[in-house]
Amino acid sequence: MIYRYVLASLMVALGFLNVNSQINLDSSLVAYYKLDGNTSDASTFQVTGTPKAIISVPGKSGIANTAYGFNGSSSQIDCGVVNRGILETVTISAWIKTNTTNLSFIVGKYDWIADKGYHLFINNGKLGLAGRNNGGKYMNTMPIGINNYAADGNWHFAVAEITGNSWALWMDCIQVAQMISNAAVPILSNSESLTIGYYDKVISSPEQHFDGVIDEVRIYNRVLSVSERSLLCDINYEDSVVSSASIDTVLMDESNWVWPNIFTPNGDGINDNFVLEIPYKACLTGSVYNRWGVGVYECKDVAFSWNGRTSNGEKLPAGVYFYMVSYCVNDETISRKGTVTLMRGSN
């Protein structure tokens, strides 16, 4: 936390704006189910979900009663038929933990009979985003090269976005799927309920019930900016990592870490490199990806440092980038993911 205050002061000194302070993640938030012991909706719509056969369990933070467990056969939360102003554009985010490889709904408002709607789901263990376009076509995102396997029993953060003919999906801050369709613009509004953890309009309904844990579902009736999506991912990811029982206790102390979220590689000798300082530096490897999920930089060293250029030395544009690093603690390999903003000054 101390580092963030120092970084903010540095940004002011350099004449940059504190972008995060200007972001309002409540803007156009039309559904917000925290699932922390109840199914109330913290958005302005305030549509309390109707639960069935769900169990209150520890969430991504590891704190008791901050998420709900779904049994894969009868668990569900019905959040009502209100369309919440969603017509052609929607952004969905949710935390999930599962071992199932069955086709199962995470969250959606979907009516295949009326050929309308959208849903975030797991299929063959992989995260997916799909829906109908009201033109007889089923829209389904395709992977773009980064593994989106989510059925490993770990917490994963999913963000899905539909706007016009563009369908995109992120997992753990990295874009894993995108589709630009030449089909009709989808009609997302329909008369079915918004549901969490199930879809019951099929014959084999047990396959559509989620088996695992779901935490903090957000839905927006607009597209999030790169900065907004980055901040949302950063907020959620930090919350989950701090409480992870799989990490050695000493790593919980933020005083042991320096995890910057912005750097300015403009050659002035101040904050020119994105450097990750880790207490345990054995077998440290890391990669950086652009907003499309394309790898732009890779480092295999005891100290991770990136100067804002590709591995071939090409200068990269300003923007939000995603990183994944792995390191060893007591013969155990641990991975961490996050975002960093590359900013360039006038020079």
Image (spheres, helix red, strand yellow):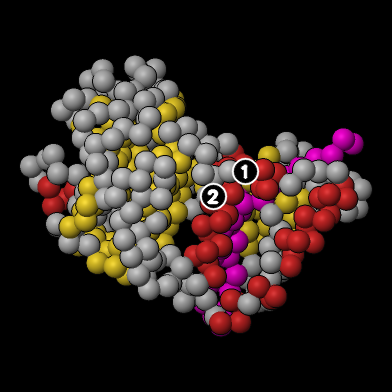
Q: In the image, is residue 17 part of the stretch drawn in magenta?
A: no
Main secondary structure found in the magenta portion? strand
Figure quadrant of the C terminus: top right
Residue at label 2?
Answer: 232
Mark drawn on residue 103: none
Q: Position of residue 27 (x, y in %)?
A: 52, 39
Residue situated furthest left in the rendering: 203
Q: In the image, is residue 329 part of the stretch drawn in magenta?
A: yes
Q: Tell me which residue sits at (86%, 43%) in the image.
A: 15
Q: Position of residue 171 (x, y in %)?
A: 46, 49
**Corner quadrant of residue 9:** bottom right
Q: Earlier in the sequence, mark 1 or mark 2?
A: 1
For the residue pair 236 and 308, the one nearer the viewer reads as 236
Distance of mark 1 from mark 2, alpha carbons?
10 Å
Q: Is residue 165 visible?
A: yes
Residue at label 1?
Answer: 23
Q: Is residue 225 above or below residue 46?
A: above
* 345 left or right, relative to 316: right
